[in-house]
Amino acid sequence: MKRQFYFFIRIYLFFLIIGTVSCITCGGNSPNYYNVESFSSSLLKKVYIDDTFLFEDLEDDEVNYNEYGVLISPLNEYYSTANKSFLVNSMYACDEVPPTTTDKYLDVNVFTNNAFDEDHLEGSDVSDFFKILNFDNNLLTIDDFMQLSPLIEGSLILVLDEKPSASGDFSFTIHITLDGKILNEFELITNSVKINID
């Protein structure tokens, strides 16, 4: 009986040492969840390749209205939960699992900082003039996107879907409402750029 007891103790110590080494080798606990702390934005230009399109950073000081996009990227704070069972969790320390969040979008509103047309003067809500290119590369209205109760799992692209009444310099204020543990509201102001209607 003593031999069996010592055998199990040796096996347990063996796995304990191997688990500790694997945890050290792989860098210990990697983050397993995150919360959104803020957002950043940058301007994009739609580029067509064959029958499809993609967005690149806007490097010019002007863009056609149907090529205008705004990248909205969450800036996250990452966390790790403590191991509940040192032996079991350290044995799986190298199994990387992408971090998750419970933070979700509630609404995105876009306001023009310049007169967009005669009905939408400076400060007007022009959210209906934009669509969202979501995580699956589908273009949705902002309302349709919000109906999905989307988790904040990556960047969004706002795509201008209507042209202003005249070419000119435009910037937009983007107000984001979210259900987050750290953040509930955030506002971004895009850089000004000339938007051409032709």
Image (tube, rainbow, N blue to C red):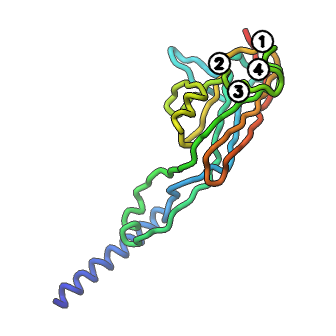
Residue identifier under label 4:
62
Q: In which quarter of the image is residue 166?
A: top right
Q: Are marks 1 and 2 in contact (CB under 8 Å)?
A: no
Q: Do the residues labelled 4 and 3 touch (CB within 8 Å)?
A: no
Hey, what amino acid is under mark 3? Leu
Of 186 and 179, which appears nearest the observer?
179
| Rendered residue at 28%/83% (across/down) | 9
Question: For the residues carrying marks 4 and 1, which lies nearer the camera in this image?
Answer: 1
Task: Pick whichever of labels 1 and 3 is earlier in the sequence.
Answer: 3
Identity, as a three-letter code, of the amino acid under mark 4: Glu
- In this picture, is 23 found above or below 114? below
Q: Distance between the residues labelled 2 and 3?
A: 17 Å
Q: Earlier in the sequence, mark 2 or mark 3?
A: 3
CB atoms of marks 4 and 2 within 8 Å:
no
Residue placed at 38% from the left, 70% from the top?
19
Instruction: Identify whether 155 is placed above or below 61.
Output: below
Quickly name the residue at label 2.
161
| Classed neighbour count for the residue bearing mark 2: other residues with Cα under 10 Å, few (<14), some (14–19), many (≥20) | some
Residue assigned mark 1: 165
109 relative to 17, above or below:
above
Amino acid type of the residue tagged 2 in the rendering: Asp
Q: Which of marks 1 and 3 is in front?
A: 1
Which tag is nearer the camera, tag 4 or tag 2? 2
Q: Name the residue under label 3.
A: 58
